[in-house]
Image: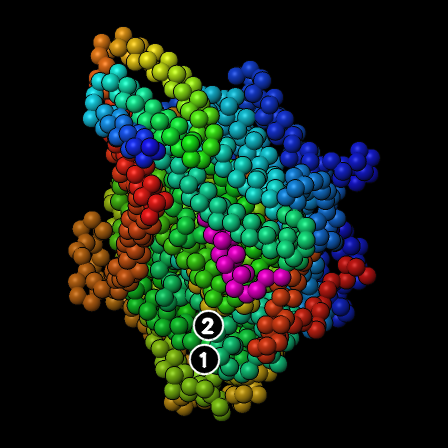
Amino acid sequence: MTLILEAIGYGGWALHALVWLPVLGMLLVLRSEEESAKHVAFWWSLGVFVLSLGLWWAFEPGWGGMQLASSTPWIPAWGVDYALGVDGISLFMVLLTTFTTPLAILGSYRYIGKRQRAFYALMLLLEAGVVGVFLATDVFLFYVFFELTLVPMYFIVGIWGGERRIYAAIKFFLYTAFGSLLMLVGILYLFMKAKTMLGVPTFALAELLQVPLSGTEQLWLFSAFALAFSIKVPLFPLHTWLPDAHVEAPTPGSVVLAAVLLKMGTYGFLRFLLPLFPVASQHPTVVSVMMVLAVIGIVYAAWVAAVQPDAKKLVAYTSVAHMGFVVLGIFALTLNGIQGGLVVMISHGLSTGALFLLLGMLYERRHTREIEAFGGVGRVAPLFATAFVITALASIGLPGTSGFVGEFLALLGTFETHPTIAIVASAGVIFAAYYMLPMVQKVFFNALEKPENREMEDLSGRELVILTPLVALMILVGWHPTPILERMEPSIEVVLERVEEAAAPVMEAEMLPGSETSHAPETAPTTSSETD
Amino acid sequence: MTIFSTLLTSVVQEGHGGGGGDFVPFLPGLVVLLPLLGFVINGFLALRHARRSADAVRAGGELDLGGPGERPATHTLPSLVGPGVMLLAFLVTLVNFVRMLGSELHEPMVVHYWTWIDTGAFHVSAALQLDQLSMVMMMVVTGVGFLIHVFSVGYMKDDPGYPRYFAYLNLFVFFMLVLVMGSSYPLMFVGWEGVGLCSYLLIGYWFSDREKADAGKKAFIVNRIGDFGFLVAMFFLFVTFGTLDFVPVFHDAPDALVYGGGLATAISLFFLLGATGKSAQIPLYVWLPDAMAGPTPVSALIHAATMVTAGVYMVARSSTLFALSPVGSATVAGIGVLTALFAATIALKQNDIKKVLAYSTVSQLGYMFLGVGVGAYAAGVFHLMTHAFFKALLFLGSGAVIHSMHHALHHTHNHADPQDMRNMGGLRKYMPITWTVMWLATLAIAGIWPFAGFFSKDEIIWQTAAFGGAEHAPFPGLYTAYWVIALAAAMLTAFYMTRLMVMTFHGSNRTGSAEEKHLHEAPAVMWVPLAVLAVLSTFGGWINVPEAIRESFLGGFGVLPMTEWLHHWLEPVTATAHHIQETNLGELSHYAPFGGGEVAWAVISTVMALVIVVAASRVLVRGEVKPAAEDAEPTGFGKVLYNKWYVDELYDRTVVQPLLRLSRFCWKWIDAFLIDGAVNAAGLVARGMGWAGSLFQTGNLNTYAFFFSLAALVILGVVVF
Amino acid sequence: MITEALILSAILFVVGTFGVLVRRNAIIMFLCIELQLNAVNLAFVALSRLVGIDGQVFVFFVMTVAAAEAAVGLAIIISIFRHYESVDVNNFNLLKW
């Protein structure tokens, strides 16, 4: 595989292709027939996914820095570069994006009736924007892509959404734009500082990392960046745009929103916040605030989710809870915590994406999302029920599914540094069952009383094609996450090293004892004789 | 690939095993894999059938399965696959067991398959651990499991969801084996939650029935509260040891943890919370009685013989950790003994045959907790094993009874409850085999010599006394109380079990004259497993007869060959714990709190139990029992017991409803009103300002001109002055 | 001399301003605007004696613009009149909030 990739010079153009091919696809979709637009979009995005799979082999697992990196001046006067690169953190986000987009498009075949061309064009534009966010290594370029994703999502919610789509779209737009504008101020401040420091204008992340910042500066800049990313995540109490946007968005919109867009926030934490402002990121107050908000998000969102009458809103709130685990893991500032957070990001993308697809399928059949309108559906749609139950279980972190690996590691990592918070957050596993199981029961179990539900069709071939890879991945990642973990680890080490370096002077001053609690065991278990 | 290569190497090395040498495991992965394979096959059949049945429902009817001879493949193959994989798994286990018997194994054998999680800071393998303890559990799970699978073939044969039933059952066995064979806490947790999932699926097996689906949900959520404890305990372990694999943790524990220290206590208490959830102990026992909504063989397998004993297994597995925490151990024992008594009192007044057995299970699990809580880990596991035999037998027997009752009521279109003992009576005449084996099981559970339960229960009670009387026992008075309560609960056990037997099998029949004719003995596929279990319930206790009893007349003055066999067998696993105990507690007592030795108290308790059984059966047979439809509501204290001390109601008032109210409050007030209100208010302020500004836009040319001039004057003024 | 010219210019400008503000007839308002423009022109010319030739140059610009404005403005007023049969500006307040 590696040989083939080398033969076609994959490493040289792959990242650019991943950003620009969806744009090209968008133009193609716009030029195609209204009826065939969806097929063009689906096959095109599938092609992009196949292309992105090459990254798996082109990526060097043992190395933590940016790989396949390239940089060309874009606006030389301001020092803006068109710079792309991939590391262990962004690799999986890119793959998740290219993986969910075709599935989301395939899942919208029946849902989207009007203005299909425009819709699928926007979906591809969204893909380009998100991939760009994850690949950009220039802060300005990152910001451009970050804002670019707002536009297609705004229209997707605002045009193809439900009844309150305008309200939801504007809320979504204003909420996120508000945050990112503050981030822009922060970016410009950094830029100015770097310019006076280095003498040349630059937005390159690697250069900005060299800029020494005082503690106060870091705290202010951290706040500006953190606000933008926290809204995106979303972190309690900045989460209220999410339920509205999810409920009103059409199925594919919700899928991409949950699976990918939210991850831009936590990705931003890892890529920018921790490395750029290492002192602020481990300031005890900052860490406590972020962690407490994350824990509140976990517990509170679970409670609120449990009493939602609308199934889609329920799942939307669970997103807040899941992303709380990610933030928790990241600010634990331990290897386990961040690895766990990243796995939760992947797992949440798979399971919540699948849940939204399933709810979309349910809506297409019954034109309602009221939980009370269903009941006993498992009898007429057994495959549907099976897929839903497995997905729901992955979502609540049952061992053997991807959700468990992520949540377990995130909590484990948190416990290493903040035991009390980890214990409270662990209660989230109880509340996860408390919100998910009643919904599953009310929809799929109980008596099949309503005549409308009797008519319901089971999964069609197309829907099976959508769900099978998702379910398979949930279980596969649950049992064998090592390939993912080993690729992330070096890049996370890089981030952590940076944070620890910054901490060193602080630590020396305060004479804090190092963490001596976790030492490797000296005895190895008796292994079987299989090897000798 | 790794799996296969390991399997192959194991086969090749087959010849080296046995004969006092090293233990060579025989395809341990296969034991786990076989039930999984069964699940895949049955699951596929189940989905196929469900698709067809769904088509029929959509067309407005129900799928007709046809008579017993003309069933489709989806309903005949599971009869072969379900018990088949279990038999194979049992045979493989047996081979391993025999090999282990013939070899010296002091350290657990860990068979590594693949790296499950490796973050760089935390590593855990998908690996199976074979040692004496997991071997006992594997034997119980696959052996009793196989018998129950066979029984299910008869019991469930007319159920439309037949393949789905076997799929769940096989999946359960898979997870149960992962639980007992996993070589680390996380892997045990996989099994731990996995069996919980299967329990959920099987309790709610008839998911169209709301009550049953509710019961499944309750089981899952309550279990998750316990799982929370398990998780936290794992976190504590990890920060202390840097690993969660059993072997290094138990190796390092005596040095890393201080005896009686806060950390050891925290770990053991959080693990205990996990165990109370899974093993249905106070305060999390409430799900188990409701779990009887599942098919009866499920109650036998999951809610009596295997899954609910996972908590006991876990404490026994973690014996080193619990031994290091006297407070933790005392709490384990205390919760156990209280549960034993509490559940026994409830069982006195239940009329549903399965409910009696459910509370009886809770009570017996309490004994096991008492056992492992007083450091008698082998005794706890011993009772776990004998309980698996006699309780599975009791449940399956009750299944046979319900099966028969159901047929009789079904034939006559009677809607009476087939599980209500008030509708039974006199079944002895129609079901002689079931009657016989259930009496054997009753004598076993009542602790009457020489049945299995006598040895295991007596051992636990004796060890409680011995532990409390140790030289440096931590809370001697407390253990005396435990001992008294344990004895009292044993007497209650004898009584309620006799009541069950009398109400079901003796006296006159209350089913109804028309129904009576349709009562019949269970078919061979059902009674043969019963007979096997009856043998085990009768003689199963002989593998661990205490030395003192063996030498006395109760042990036939030393004729039994396998004295304290299980105790010695488990010694490698519990050695560290016993060592810690000996160092810190000193010599255990040889006398009960009020005098008397082991043999004396064994005689006293068995005689008392026998007296109660005989007396109760005499008295109860004479007493009039009315059929359920005519029976009056119980009054006074009986009503409290009948309503299970109102614990469910209490939980509903103090936990469930407040949580729901809090959730609604969070949603309506914090989310929608406070946060969203603030957000919308910010939007409104911006809009309001825009609106105020727009008032100047009158559209009137003169107004514009006026403001224009005014502004010009103001600017002029500012510039000039 | 300049003072008188500037005073006249100011008086003319104020008259024009008041005319624009109080009158409702579009034509008259238009005439008043012309009056204002010419008041400014007068001031420019007067001040050019003091400051230099620039003021007179500016007057030419103003006159050009005023001519163009007159052409366009009158055209608009005529078309409005054709449509509404009125040149009262109180009738034309469509451009409000």
Quadrant of the rendered structure where residue B224 is?
A: bottom left
Residue visible at 36% across and 73% down in the picture: B338
Q: Is residue B603 above or below residue B32?
A: below
**Chain letter of disc 1 in the image:** B
User: Dot 1, how many residues are within 10 Å of its Cα: few (below 14), some (14-19), or many (20+)?
Assistant: many
Membership of A214 in magenta stretch: yes
Query: Which residue position is annotated with label 2?
Result: B269
User: Dot 2, how many residues are within 10 Å of its Cα: few (below 14), some (14-19), or many (20+)?
Assistant: many
Q: Amino acid at mark 2?
A: Leu
Q: Secondary structure at mark 1?
A: helix
Query: Which residue position is annotated with label 1?
Result: B327
- Percent position of residue B168, x then y: 50, 46
Residue visible at 57% across and 88% down in the picture: B583
Q: Would you say A294 lies left or right of A344 here?
A: left
Quadrant of the rendered structure where residue A84 is?
A: top right
- Percent position of residue A479, x then y: 61, 50
Q: Is residue A427 above or below residue B326?
A: above
- Percent position of residue A433, x then y: 42, 52
Task: Name the one closer to the observer, A495 or A410.
Answer: A495
Residue visible at 53% across and 37% down in the picture: A149
Picture quarter with the N terminus of chain C:
top left
Which badge, 2 or 1, is on the more N-terminal residue? 2
Membership of A93 in magenta stretch: no
Q: Which residues are magenta?
A: A212-231
Task: Name the one closer to the observer, B655 or B364.
Answer: B655
Residue, far top: C82
For the residues labelled 2 and 1, say whether their Cβ atoms are less than 8 Å apart. Answer: yes
Q: Amino acid at mark 1?
A: Val
Quadrant of the rendered structure where residue B506 is?
A: bottom left
Is residue B402 visible from the viewing direction of this image?
A: no
Task: Name the one closer to the observer, A73 or B488.
Answer: A73
Q: Secondary structure at mark 2?
A: helix
